[in-house]
Image: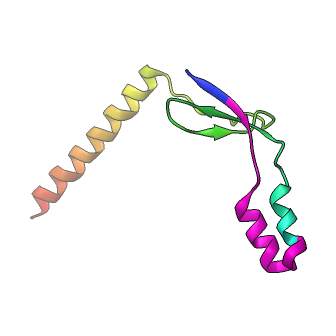
Amino acid sequence: MNIASGQKGYGLGKAAAGGILLGPVGLLGGMIGRKKIELVCQDCGKGWDPSEKPKKTVTIAPKTFKIVLLVYVAVVALVVLYVIWAL
């Protein structure tokens, strides 16, 4: 895993929105959040804020996955056989 860190710069999108809503003073809105640190994965390009809490991920044990896959394939096979038999 290859991770790089950097600071966010001037936000052009925030400045444009602020400029449209508030005129020239709104252009300062691009400065909001400019000192935030952002981490970026060099392998996939995904970025995230290190102060965010990690999202919970659901992991399935390989044995459970195999059972679920087997049941799914069996159900699909039964449906296909029923459709063929009904014709």
> Which residue is pictured at 85% across the width and 63% down the height?
29
Total tally of numbered discs in the picture: 0
Furthest residue to the front? 24
Residue 18 covered by magenta stretch: yes
> Which residue is pictured at 11% across the width and 57% down the height?
84
The N terminus lies in which quarter of the figure?
top right
Residue 50 horizontal side relative to residue 74, left or right: right
* 24 or 60: nearer the viewer: 24
> Which residue is pictured at 84% across the width and 55% down the height?
31
Q: Based on the displayed image, in which of its 4 quarters is residue 70 positioned?
A: top left
Give residue 82's position: percent from left, percent from top: 18, 54
The C terminus lies in which quarter of the figure?
bottom left
Up the image or down, 86 lies above or below 6; here it is below
Q: Based on the displayed image, in which of its 4 quarters is residue 30 positioned?
A: bottom right
* 42 or 16: nearer the viewer: 16
Give residue 46's position: percent from left, percent from top: 58, 39
Residue 72 horizontal side relative to residue 46, left or right: left
Prevailing secondary structure class for the magenta stretch in the rendered image: helix
* 44 or 73: nearer the viewer: 44
Give residue 50's position: percent from left, percent from top: 76, 33
Range drawn in magenta: 5-25
Up the image or down, 3 lies above or below 47; here it is above
